[in-house]
Every structure is written in C-alpha cells, then in structure tokens.
C-alpha cells in the first residue's frame, strides 16, 4: 500500500501550501465557539469529515482552493445541524476580506514627528498600495530564509495587529516594525519548543 499524496491548497493570493487538517479543525472550533457551542470533540469529528471528503473526491487532482475548503466546511456544518456556525464562519470570512480591502500601505518610512507631513502628502497623492499579507510572506521567505509556514504565521500575526488598530493607511515602517517584533517572538517560541 503506497503513501497517500499530500493535498495542496491554492490560497486566495495564488500561493500554494500543504493542506493542514488542524487549520480546518481550528476554523470549525472557532465557528462553534462563536455560537456558544465550543466542543473540541465535535470540531475534530467534523474536520475529519472535511479531510476525508477532500482526499476521496480529488482522485486525480491533489490541489484544492481555500474557497473550496471553506464551502465544504460550511456544507458539513449545515448538514450536521450547525447552520448558525456556518453563518458565523461566512460572516468572519467576509469581514476579513472587507478589512483587507479597506487597508492601504503608504510607502513612507516614519522615523519621527517631522515625517508625518510626508505621510499626509503620500495619502493625498495616491502613492499607496492595497494591503497584501502575501508580500510579507514572500519577503520573509526570499530575504530571510524563513519557512513558508513560519512566514505565514508571522504575516497573520501582523495582519491581526493592523486590523486591531482600525486604521486604513499604514506606513511601511510600521509594518516593518510589526514584522520584526512578531518574527522575533515566533523564532523565540520555536527555539524554546526545541529545547523541551
């Protein structure tokens, strides 16, 4: 009996990563928690159904989009009596897309109070780009040799901080500082885990 091929996920930004059963379990667990029905056992069982379905309905293709996974998770939640969790998952996904679409990166390196005028001029001139956390991932992988999984973790942590700030224009210097801080924290945690 041969080893089963690993399923690859095509992310919304076009990048490809390995399918992680634990991410599906986490998404289901979070959706159940949002409706006051947090249950690790149920989350695990439903994630098993999703994973089984993905592997057994991809006979010739070992890729799936993140959107397809989301649809399957919502279908499994709905079919098993957790319609409210499926709605919560949809709303969460929509909110994140909306937040991403509202954030712009301003290419200004703010070092002090005097740079605020440069920031204001950049905002007015339209010299900015859309928020894209995959750029953080690509930079960490290409320039610093981090694994894609570690880089995605750092980028997600940075994105969460930017979302929590509730700002629509982010100077590139702030992103750089957040990336440095979160990368240091992740690498420190990984090192501690290796010594245990």
Image: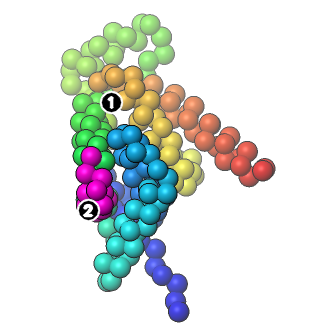
Residue, x 52% and y 28% (percent of image)? 177
In front here: 26 or 149?
Answer: 26
Part of the protein shown in magenta: 72-84
Residue underneath mark 2: 79
* Left or right position of 33 against 40: left
Name the secondary structure under disc 1.
Answer: strand
Query: Which of the two labelled residues, at mark 2 and mark 1, occupies the earlier sequence position?
Result: 2
Residue furthest toward the right?
Answer: 195
Of residues 5 and 127, the one drawn nearer to the viewer in this rendering: 5
Instruction: Say whether residue 82 is left or right of residue 26.
Output: left
- At 39% from the left edge and 52% from the top edge, which residue is drawn? 28
| Residue to which mark 1 is pinned | 105
Of residue 40 and residue 51, the one placed in the foreground of this image is 40
Q: How is the image coloured?
A: rainbow
Residue 18, image x and y in percent? 45, 64
Residue positioned 25% across, 51% down in the render: 83
Residue at the (43%, 67%) spot, across then down: 48
Circle 2 — which element? helix
Residue 123 x/y as whole percent: 25, 19
76 lies left or right of 193: left
- Asked if residue 149 lies in the magenta stretch, the reply is no
Q: In the rendered image, is residue 129 in sight? A: no
The answer to whether residue 33 shows anywhere in this view is: yes
Q: How many marks?
A: 2
Position in image of residue 44 (x %, y %): 47, 60
Q: Nearer the viewer, mark 2 or mark 1?
A: 2
């Amino acid at each position: 009996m041969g080893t089963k091929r690993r399923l690859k996920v095509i992310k919304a930004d076009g990048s490809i990563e390995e399918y992680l059963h634990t991410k599906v379990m986490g998404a289901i667990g979070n959706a159940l928690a949002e409706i006051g029905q947090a249950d690790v056992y149920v989350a695990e069982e439903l994630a098993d159904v999703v994973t089984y379905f993905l592997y057994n309905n991809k006979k010739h293709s070992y890729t799936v989009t993140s959107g397809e996974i989301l649809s399957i998770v919502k279908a499994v939640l709905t079919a098993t009596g957790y319609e409210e969790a499926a709605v919560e998952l949809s709303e969460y996904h929509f909110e994140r897309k909306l937040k991403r679409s509202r954030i712009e990166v301003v290419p200004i390196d703010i070092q002090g109070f005097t740079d605020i005028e440069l920031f204001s001029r950049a905002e007015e001139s339209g010299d900015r780009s859309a928020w894209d956390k995959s750029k953080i991932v690509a930079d960490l992988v290409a320039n610093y040799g981090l694994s894609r999984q570690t880089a995605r973790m750092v980028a997600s942590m940075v994105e969460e901080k930017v979302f929590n700030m509730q700002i629509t224009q982010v100077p590139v210097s702030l992103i750089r500082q957040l990336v440095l801080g979160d990368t240091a924290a992740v690498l420190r945690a990984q090192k501690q885990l290796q010594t245990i």
